[in-house]
Image (tube, rainbow, N blue to C red):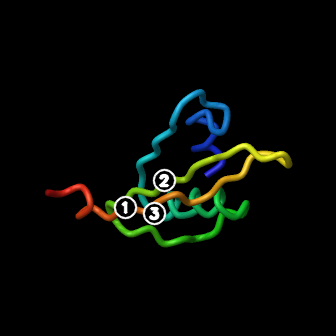
Amino acid sequence: PDEVLAVAGWPDARGAVMLIGHQPWLGQLASLLLTGVAQDLTIKKSNAWWIARRQREEGNELYLRAVLAPDFFLD
């Protein structure tokens, strides 16, 4: 997960960063961002996770803003 974040330019990218991948590294990446530790985390196929960052006095805070299942995008 650390290598993926480095290639994506996270957290220094100027805009949004979208990462698309497979298990197990995608779950490990989500775990690293949300908890600070890369652990196996199950992400269902085709789900979109929106992990956002906000500025706080004590530093940046990452949080899970939304998880969208594929049927959300269908009419």
Kindly identify which residue carries mark 2: 50
Q: Quadrant of residue 71?
A: bottom left
| First in residue order: circle 1 vs circle 2 | 2
**Mark toward the viewer: 3 or 1:** 1
> Residue flagged by tag 3: what amino acid is it?
Gln
Which residue is at a point 58% across and 35% down the rendered structure image? 7
**Mark 3: secondary structure:** loop
Q: Is residue 47 left or right of residue 19?
A: left
Mark 1 and 2 residues: CB-CB less than 8 Å, in contact?
A: yes
Q: Is residue 55 left or right of residue 73?
A: right
x and y percent of residue 19 in the render? 46, 45
Q: Nearer the viewer, residue 58 or 29?
A: 58
**Mark 2: secondary structure:** strand
x and y percent of residue 8 in the render? 56, 36
Mark 3 and 1 residues: CB-CB less than 8 Å, in contact?
A: no
Image quarter (top left, top right, bottom left or bottom right) of the C terminus: bottom left
| First in residue order: circle 3 vs circle 2 | 3
Q: CA distance from mark 1 to mark 2?
A: 8 Å
Which residue is at a point 64% across and 69% down the rendered structure image? 39
Kindly identify which residue carries mark 1: 68
Which residue is at a point 52% across and 63% down the rendered structure image? 27
Q: Is residue 35 left or right of residue 47?
A: right
> Residue flagged by tag 2: what amino acid is it?
Trp
Kindly identify which residue carries mark 3: 23
Q: Is residue 47 left or right of residue 49?
A: left
Q: Callout 1: few (<14), some (14-19), or many (20+) C-alpha neighbours within 10 Å?
A: few
Q: Residue furthest right?
A: 58
